[in-house]
Image (cartoon, helix red, strand yellow):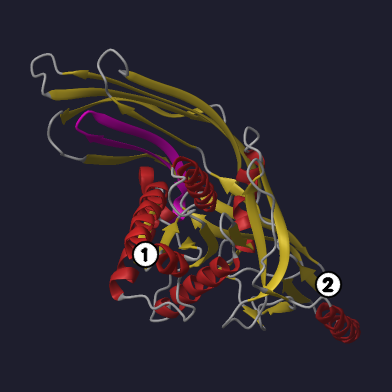
Amino acid sequence: MMNSTPLDLTHQDLSSIEQYRMQRQTSVLVILFTDIKGFTEIAERRGDGHAVELLRYHDEIVVRAIEEGGAGLVVKHIGDSVMAVFAEPSTAVERALRIQEETAAFNDSHPDMETLGIRIGLHMGQVAVENQTRLDLVGRHVNRASRVETLADAGQIYLTYPVFDSARGWLRAQSGRDLGWKLHGRYILKGLEEAVEIYEVVDKRRRAPVPPINGRRKSRLLPVWLALGVFLVGAALVYGIMRYQRTEVYFANWGPELTIVDQKQPLALIGVRSQESQLAVTPLPVGRHLLHQDISARMRNYMEVEIKRGLNVIAPEMTTVYMPSLKRRLDFHAGRREQVEATQTFTYPLYDKANQRIDSNAELSVSIKGAPDKDNPDLMVFLCSWKAVENGSLVGADTIELKSPAKLDQRQERKIVIREDAMHYWYVSTYTNRRSAELEVSAAYIEYKKAE
């Protein structure tokens, strides 16, 4: 079982996290922890040999689910626990569900072994800064994720609000899967000043949501007094505003992610981030404003707010926007798998520099055809065709011939920017190795091109 003391990150751990973050072009990461329930008791009851074998199966299931297809990165093993990071919240939740699904299948097929019960906790936060506070910032999010995991029981997946809010759209879109989620309330975690909202995601075919059995839920009585205090403070503020005609903006239950105001400056808040509101010190004049949070190069949370004269209290109601992206991979097998192709349409909003919304649509097509070279059968030839159309106008279309040694491990990657404007840019990326090829056509926010 994972130690309850704050987790220390080595320079190697931080280097791995930073390298992954830069590869994914994101300033926010999801941190995932797993843990085997009752591992110490299993070792005492069945012996170290049995416990080590169970741990080996745990690591195989967890590492494969996390890193398959390059989805996430295992940062470190801590006894019977695993720490990993993901760039996409929906991917992190999907892989957590996969871990529990594969664990259930393992238990069904190994009745002679102790039941493998895995607990999972996820938290999300900004990890990219430009000064010496990075260690404290990353460590804070890591420790919070580890605390959330300790609340879970075997087979459970617990999330903090930022992860749930960002993955909510993906969860709702899984119409073919019987997934469910539930808010269990605010729980006090060891070492944290404020209570944390705990959500659970479940496969309803296997289990129902269950609140933490070993956590301390924040008393319901306290918010009543807090509400009274907020009311009295609010009354005083209203009086002051009426008297001095000032405009004040408070943000309630605001998450830890870096929020940008009007695509120009970070949102700065003062006060303890808890159930109470925090006062905005970033100027927000009366009128309409655009808030956004960068999740990755192709993913942002947006929120439009209207500031009025007087007291404003704003709750997080972000909408997650995904830029269009289509990617396919061909693993060539003669006579069985020689070609892949796909076409997909997308709808998404863009915001110009005046913060005006531009509702956009795109249609992307990709195709990969593979065959051995006619003159050299040890050389694979891939024809990669693509086409991108945005708002009825052609972004670009082309066919690229790629060659790859069929029997040599020789990875080749290429990225070409095909168009850019003040809001976003389009690119095509290719990858080949042995008898495999990948083709991706995507759009990304222009700020990330400037950062390359």
Nearer to the camera, 361 or 406:
406
Dominant SS type (magenta): strand
In the image, which disc is placed on residue 47?
A: 1
Q: Quick check: 25 above or below 206? A: below
Q: Mark 2 = which residue?
A: 309
Point 59% across, 63% down: residue: 152
Q: Earlier in the sequence, mark 2 or mark 1?
A: 1
The span picked out in magenta is 426-447
Residue for point 15% across, 39% down: 410
Vertical side of 255 occupied by 441: above or below: above
Q: Is residue 78 left or right of residue 371?
A: right
Three-letter code, disc 1: Gly
Q: In this picture, is 201 found above or below 34?
A: above
Relative to 366, 157 lies left or right? right
> Looking at the picture, how far across and down is residue 57, in whole percent?
37, 51
Q: Is 266 colored magenta in this rendering?
A: no
Q: Quadrant of residue 212?
A: bottom right
Q: Quick one: 236 or 103, which is closer to the camera?
A: 103
Q: Secondary structure at mark 2?
A: loop
Number of numbered discs on residues: 2
